[in-house]
Image (cartoon, rainbow, N blue to C red):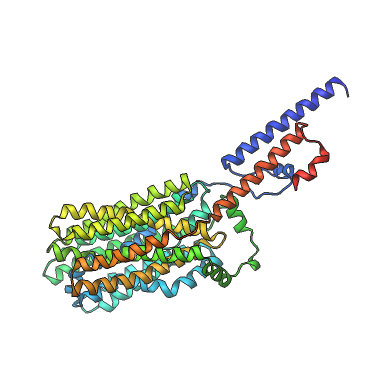
Amino acid sequence: MNENQALGDSQATADETKVGLENHAKLEAGDAAQPDDDRGQLGEELPPTRLYRRRWMIVLLFSSYSLCNSYQWIQYGIINNIFMKFYGVDTFTIDWMSMIYMLTYIPFIFPVTWLLDKKGLRVIALVATALNCVGTWIKVVSVRQDLFPVTFLGQFCTSLAQVFILGMPSRIASVWFGSNEVSTACSVGVFGNQLGIAIGFLVPPILVPNVDDMDELAHHIRIMFYITAGVATFLFVLVVFVFQERPELPPTQAQARARNMPPEEYSYVASILRLLRNRPFILLILTYGLNVGCFYAVGTLLNRMIIDHYPGEEVNAGRIGLTIVIAGMVGSLICGIWLDKTKTYKQTTLVVYFMSLVGMIVYAATLHLGHLWVVFITAGALGFFMTGYLPLGFEFAVELTYPESEGTSSGLLNCSAQVFGIFFTICQGKIMDRFNTLAGNIFLCVFLLVGTIMTGFIKSELRRQNANLSSKTGVSAKISIWFLIHSGHITAGKTHFLWQ
């Protein structure tokens, strides 16, 4: 070998080493896609991954139509005394305008999650926004005192749309976002639902004042329904032209593995059965249902609680509901960012659950003191933790159940929440009628205590994180061996053993 050839080989090795180190850095940083040459050099074909800017537009669009739908959940309940007067029905009937959202979810969640697995996110988004749009226009034509069944039909349509919305944040986060931002993305998805509830607490008492003239009252109700229908129609058009099924390349190796699973290897029924045999997930289903069911009961009965202690304060009842949800939105975002930074799913969930219990106790103990400003503070503290728990439950469920469908696991969580929500709302309402508001809130505190204890027994198995870490570890190890071989530190004869 002459000197020039030796220098040339040395330069070639140096160039290869430089390329290898650059590609290693790209993989560790999660850059767009792994080049084909890299896969050949490493001896294993790893799927390329990429993050697209469009992902933020997708999750924000989802949040927007989730907002429009969840706003209507509390639209009747927060001014139940006004709708009771207009339609001539009792308070329990108006309570069902909120509880129909919970009842509809239970039988329809399984066919909807099956449809999600078969048809994907875009079809689910189209059906959700179409049903929501239809429901809002049915309400527009129901503003007559003898047309309560029609307005109930409109609310049923929007409650059916909710089945196609409520469990989607974790699925969208997994399909579109990288491993270090999925919890934040899920929080943004839940954020829309919470903001809609907040607007539902705030806007109806402002748009529909408590007046005695039925024609004037009908005019105010009609304006509220027209605004909702216009927004729902606009969002449906946006989904038709903007919403995309999934990115061309998956965002993570875990998502790539799930995407590459042969269809014949996946069975929806088998997936459900596997989830129901997953003990940590079963405990999470129960604890999630207890926490969120309490939130549903508080939201549905909030107007009754406030009016009972502070007569004539319908507008402030809405503002207190707004405070609960706004504080919860802040809690959700903080919890999502915290999870992405620390991956402490079990510990964070347990702390937030315990603080939800503390918040409920303080709220129950101070509601009757006669100071509205105290109620605003205690309700805000309750909302920060109780509503902030929502994305924690979704993301913890995905970790415990990977590689099962995120829509299925989220659907089971929400199904539990609806069952407990109906039970708690009916029971707390009856307790309040027979005894008082304090007794109803103590009833909820007992179940939150049970949920806190059960959360402590959930075994933390972070399967999705382990899948992403094992992919990164495998790539790093193979690149290191490749670097040593090309640097002359390992002979070709030892290569076969090291690759195994």
Q: Residue furthest right?
A: 1
Q: What residue is drawn where x is 29% and y is 77%?
A: 150
In percent of width and height, residue 385 lies at 33, 54
In percent of width and height, residue 381 lies at 27, 52
Q: What residue is drawn where x is 59% and y is 48%?
A: 469
Q: Residue furthest top?
A: 3
Q: What residue is drawn where x is 75% and y is 48%?
A: 500
- Name the one closer to the observer, 167 or 76: 167
- Name the one closer to the observer, 391 or 233: 391
In percent of width and height, residue 286 lies at 42, 66
Question: Compared with residue 363, is residue 211 higher up or lower down, i.e. above or below?
Answer: below
Res. 297 visible in picture: yes
The quarter holding residue 27 reads top right
Q: Is residue 210 left or right of residue 56?
A: left
The quarter holding residue 235 reads bottom left
Question: Compared with residue 259, is residue 19 higher up or lower down, i.e. above or below?
Answer: above
Please identify the quadrant where the N terminus is shown.
Answer: top right
Q: Is residue 28 left or right of residue 156?
A: right
In percent of width and height, residue 184 lies at 44, 49
